[in-house]
Image (cartoon, helix red, strand yellow):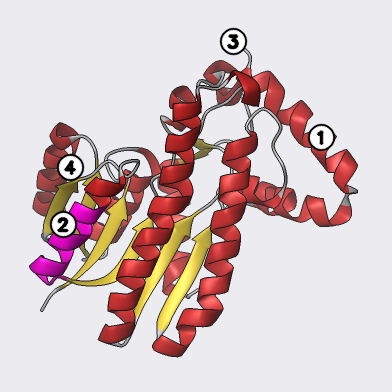
Amino acid sequence: MPSYTLITGASSGLGLALAEALARRGRNLILVARRRDALESIASELAQRFGVQVLFRLCDLGKPLQISGLLLELEEGDWHIDLLINNAGRGYAGPFLEQDWMHELEQLEVNMLALTRLCHALGKRMALQGGGQILNVASVAAFHPGPWMSSYYASKAYVLHLSEGLREELRHYGVRVSVLCPGPTRTAFFRSARMNVSRLERSAWMMNADQVALFTVRALEKNQPLIIPNWRNRLLATLPRLTPRWLMRKLAGRITQPFTKR
């Protein structure tokens, strides 16, 4: 039975870059996202270029019923999934009290609840199979608070801590868990988060999605628990341990707020 990698948020950005990097290494893929046209095109192209099997499934991870349908289909399909990449994520920038509550709820559903549900369902399958690997995509935002994107930063802290906890729990079943904490990456995320892209594009901290994907795939092959591309991002992750929390809050706010202004 062939093995598959399941990637959420695979229709663009980092998810697409990871799909290509893994297909290049001969991995069969199951791509999950909301946009059928994009998924059809990507699946066809990757299959032709790299000679791998590429399946796709439509699912809005902000809707629990759609996740239930996806998991039922995966169970009935009986595909051997040995790598799960929880890449899908949403974020909204701006003052917390001015956010639309349904956007906030959707963000938390996708970033935390959907990710946790997939870890639980597919992690259990991997344990029964005798092994597998899970990669959860967090962010350097996970290491400190983020005024003007408070819910997003908090959701990524959840992903970081969940992943580190699961790494210890699931290793007894042969399931390896890693967490990716990239810094700013050139994807559509910033536009969907309503951030000032022109400011970000000029930033020396920005990386390309392909660079992050290549770094990540190599780190996964080494079973690294915490994956932080680029020395600048590793510095950001370390800074909160060296800085008083009151000062870290203020610094984070001063860094984040300008990018939320239009």
Mark 1 and mark 3 in contact (Cβ < 8 Å)?
no
Element type where label 1 sits in the image: helix
Q: Which mark is nearer the camera, 1 or 2?
A: 1
Query: Is residue 228 shown to the viewer in this render?
Result: no
| Residue underneath mark 2 | 50
Secondary structure, mark 3, is loop
Mark 4 surroundings: few (<14), some (14-19) or many (≥20) residues within 10 A: many
Q: Distance between the residues labelled 4 and 3?
A: 33 Å
Report which quarter residue 258 is drawn in.
top right
Q: Give the range drawn in magenta.
A: 68-79
Image x and y of residue 214, in percent: 42, 55
Amino acid tagged 1: Leu
Q: Residues within 10 Å of mark 2 (few under 14, many from 20)?
A: some
Q: Name the residue under label 3.
A: 262
Q: Which residue was labeled with disc 4?
A: 42
Q: Name the residue under label 1.
A: 251
Dot 4 falls on a residue whose secondary structure is helix
Kindly identify the residue that appears in the image at 22 percent across and 51 percent down. Answer: 31
Q: Distance between the residues labelled 4 and 1?
A: 40 Å
Q: Considering only order in the chain, which callout, 1 or 4, is on the residue closer to the N terminus?
A: 4
Q: 250 and 205: which one is in front?
A: 250
Q: Residue at x 86, y 47 (%)?
A: 245
Mark 1 to mark 2 CA distance (whole Å): 45 Å
Q: Does the magenta stretch include residue 76?
A: yes
Q: Estimate how packed mark 3 is, as few (under 14), some (14 to 19) or many (20 or more) residues with alpha carbons within 10 Å.
A: few
Q: Where is residue 44 in the image (x, y as percent from the top left)?
A: 9, 45
Which residue is painted at 33% across and 76% down in the image?
Answer: 124
